[in-house]
């Protein structure tokens, strides 16, 4: 277990978080454009990337605990403390750069996730309102077997979402 392995896992985690950011932006584009057909697939892709992020994050936590112990810190020391306690050399800067990048991308992901939730809520509300305005009466047949005409009325459907 070494700082090299920790850094490699941090790179892997950053790459996966960037992929997650891409998948969330992809999902957002589908939501904004109204291409609801692909939302389920996009959501499954986001969940798949999240599973990978979780696995790498777990590996990184184990590696960070090992490096922290080797550098005289408690096993559960956060990355900021590990970077600050690094022995003389480049590790302080390298680990601090990883930490900064992780903070930035997780903030961007949180914003994307919140935006996507708002788009989903708006689409759900619009769908419910549209369905509420539709009549339950459908054309069929009356008692004599004559075809009944459908009721024709004005309907407004908001397609802006």
Image (cartoon, rainbow, N blue to C red):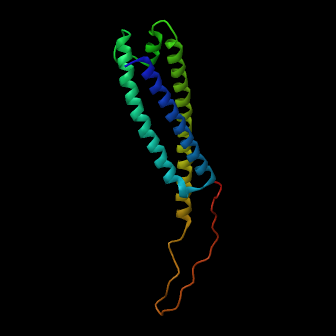
Residue extending farthest top: 88
At 51% across and 77% down in the image, what residue appears?
138
At 58% across and 42% down in the image, what residue appears?
25
Residue 27 image position (x, y, % from top left) = 56, 47
- Could one spot residue 75 in this view of the protein? yes
Q: In the displayed structure, does residue 16 sit left or right of residue 51?
A: right
12 to 152, vertically: above or below: above
- All told, the count of numbered labels is 0
Q: In the displayed structure, does residue 151 sit left or right of residue 81?
A: right
| Front residue of this view, candidates 36 and 4 | 4
60 to 122, vertically: above or below: above
Quadrant in which the N terminus is drawn: top left
At 48% across and 92% down in the image, what residue appears?
145
Residue 57 image position (x, y, % from top left) = 41, 30
Residue 13 image position (x, y, % from top left) = 47, 30
Residue extending farthest bottom: 144
| Front residue of this view, candidates 34 and 154 | 34
Q: In the displayed structure, does residue 41 sit left or right of residue 75?
A: right
- Could one spot residue 76 in this view of the protein? no
| Front residue of this view, candidates 52 and 77 | 52
| Front residue of this view, candidates 39 and 91 | 91
At 58% across and 46% down in the image, what residue appears?
26
102 to 113, vertically: above or below: above
């Amino acid at each position: 277990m070494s700082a090299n392995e920790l850094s490699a896992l941090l790179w892997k985690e950053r790459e996966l978080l960037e992929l997650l950011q891409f998948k969330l932006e992809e999902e957002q584009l589908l939501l904004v454009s109204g291409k609801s057909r692909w939302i389920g697939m996009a959501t499954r892709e986001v969940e798949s990337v999240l599973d990978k992020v979780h696995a790498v994050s777990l590996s990184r936590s184990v590696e960070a605990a090992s490096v922290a112990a080797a550098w005289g810190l408690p096993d559960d020391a956060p990355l900021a403390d590990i970077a600050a306690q690094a022995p003389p050399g480049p590790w302080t800067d390298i680990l601090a750069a990883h930490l900064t990048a992780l903070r930035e991308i997780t903030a961007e992901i949180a914003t994307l996730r919140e935006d996507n939730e708002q788009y989903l809520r708006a689409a759900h509300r619009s769908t419910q309102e549209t369905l509420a305005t539709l009549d339950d009466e459908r054309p069929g047949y009356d008692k004599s077997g004559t075809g009944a005409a459908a009721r024709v009325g004005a309907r407004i459907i908001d397609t802006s979402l």
